[in-house]
Amino acid sequence: MSPARSILIVFLPMAVLTLLLAPWIGNGLLDLSVLTRPGAEDLDAIIFWEIRVPRVLLAMLAGMGLSLGGVVFQAIFRNPLATPFTLGVAGGASLGVTLSLFLGISFTVLGISGLSLAAMIGAITSITLVYGISRTTGNSSPHSMLLGGVAISFFFSSLILLFQYLGDISNTFRIIHWLMGDLSRASYDTVFQALPFILSGIIITASLHRELNLLTLNDDLAASYGLRVEPMRRVLFFAVSLMITGIITVCGPIGFVGIMAPHICRLIIGTNHRHLIPASILFGGTFLVICDTIARTLATTAEVPVGIITALLGGPFFLWLLVKK
Amino acid sequence: MKSAEPCLEVTQLSISMGSELLLDTVNLKIHEGERLAIIGANGAGKTTLLRCLLGLLQPDTGQINLYGKNISTLTRGNIARNIAYVPQVLNPEIPFSVHDFIAMSRYSHSGNHHGLIATDNNGKEIADTMMQRTGIQHLAHRSMSTLSGGERQKASIAAALTQQSPILILDEPAAHLDPKQQDSVQTLLEEISQSNNHTIITVTHDLNWAASCFDRLIGLKNGRVISDSTPQESITTENLAGIFEAQWEILPHPRTGSPMVIR
């Protein structure tokens, strides 16, 4: 099957089907008639329209962004294990959010929440540091940037732990719960808060699919074909930070989607980013909706944070990937 | 016939990394259609010179003109339409089919469109023609990662030709290949250089190939050009001793008469 065809026949219907079915799954059977009663005051309608639908939408959006972030970083660093998480971008964003939770800051500038702003500043700080380190060592090869990113990621993680340790109990609990990666705060507000970030990231990245192909080759060769390698890398970095900012602010860091989804898509349709980008957006979204549906139905008394489910599925997959290699 | 204006002109080029001088006041004029080989020991500055010629390294002093224009003022796309590059044998982890890989070299011909639509309509035909010329059309749909080193190198050469740039720069194109694959890559390059008016600049450690197939040999030592002449004049015991600090005997090739290094 050609890549374009598998996107149309497999990935797209799968995503649409998941979007349509997931809101019906959960504790208690909902009556089909809730479909005709959006905004109604009864419990079934509220569960369906106010809780499950926005949650499924947010999971779809976050999954898309996480998966695409993985695709982009794996191309830039030419390493199948590179994601915004291994590279410290998510760590920076998480640190930003942790700090603002720790200090209890809350404000809104031009419709952007303080939390988003903190996440954005954190993400951009980590990128600047990775770039700064590779610049001062005179070696901006993907390999040394990868190492710099991993080091920064660890550094930020320990700072996050420090703030958890220093915080009072309620703040620390909020930080810990949020760091587990969780979609339970989903509402139409959070969907619309994340949407512009993720959408603009997707648009920028999708329009650069040829450049991403060139970057997977080798820097000198890509440059000799006419690509401005460094500026392009910076643009892509920025696009990924936008998406990660949008995601981290509303649902915390959700790991493994960015490794699993792109890898599976690559196995199915190849590395041409013209097809890989749409496929992994659709697959990543579908995957996270399914994981979240499992997370909220698995335990009857309380919900399991979705980050735990993706990690539980992702861990074994990761090992399989290593063994197969 | 060689035109009067050089296609590449290097003037007073110096570049250093830390305290180490990689290239030391290099001057070179390369004319259209010339076939030029750069020889020298490891660390002599050969690859650094190539990367400067490709506009990938910014020199500390001096400048490089490409058809009369300072290369550092040209866009990457502009350079790509004039100079194509064949790197040392590519790593096998290129995740594309041979055809896709070769078509990617048309990037600089697709205008400034960074959108979803490729604007380069005849790119596919040119890629097909070049695969035929390099004898790899039967590999078109194979993945680059399943090819032998020699086949991968031919795909690289096909990609460079597909770029349709008048100057071809190669970095040890036959290194790390077994003798048979070396032969086949070198024969292919000879065919290309004879049938086109490409300007060919290569770095090589294969002195006998350099002597038999190139018009001009540049000897580099410690970042300086210490010899620049025809193979007959370059491949002599004294000159090679100056470049490589080794004593080798030179004999004429029994058939072609070109000088051969006996180690």
Image: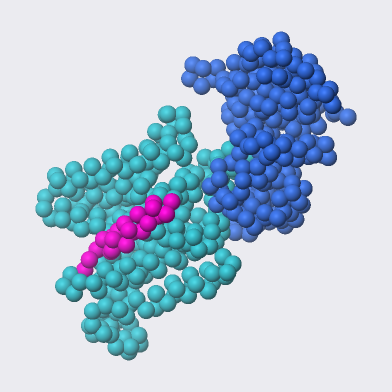
Q: Is residue A304 magenta?
A: yes
Q: Is residue A201 magenta?
A: no
Residue closest to the eye, A47 or A136 = A136
Prevalent SS, magenta region: helix
Residue closest to the eye, A265 or A186 = A265
Measured from the top left, where is residue B206 in percent x and y? 68, 27
The colour chain A appears in is: cyan
The residue shown at (23%, 85%) is: A42
The residue shown at (38%, 38%) is: A147
View extreme (front): residue: B254
The residue shown at (45%, 73%) is: A14
Can see residue A194? yes
Q: Note whether A146 is above or below A52 in the view shown.
A: above
Residues rendered magenta in the picture: A303-325
The residue shown at (25%, 74%) is: A297
From the viewer's perspective, is B247 left or right of A146? right
Can see residue B78? no
Q: Note whether A72 is above or below A17 in the view shown.
A: above
Question: On the rendered image, what quadrant is the N terminus of chain A found in?
Answer: bottom right
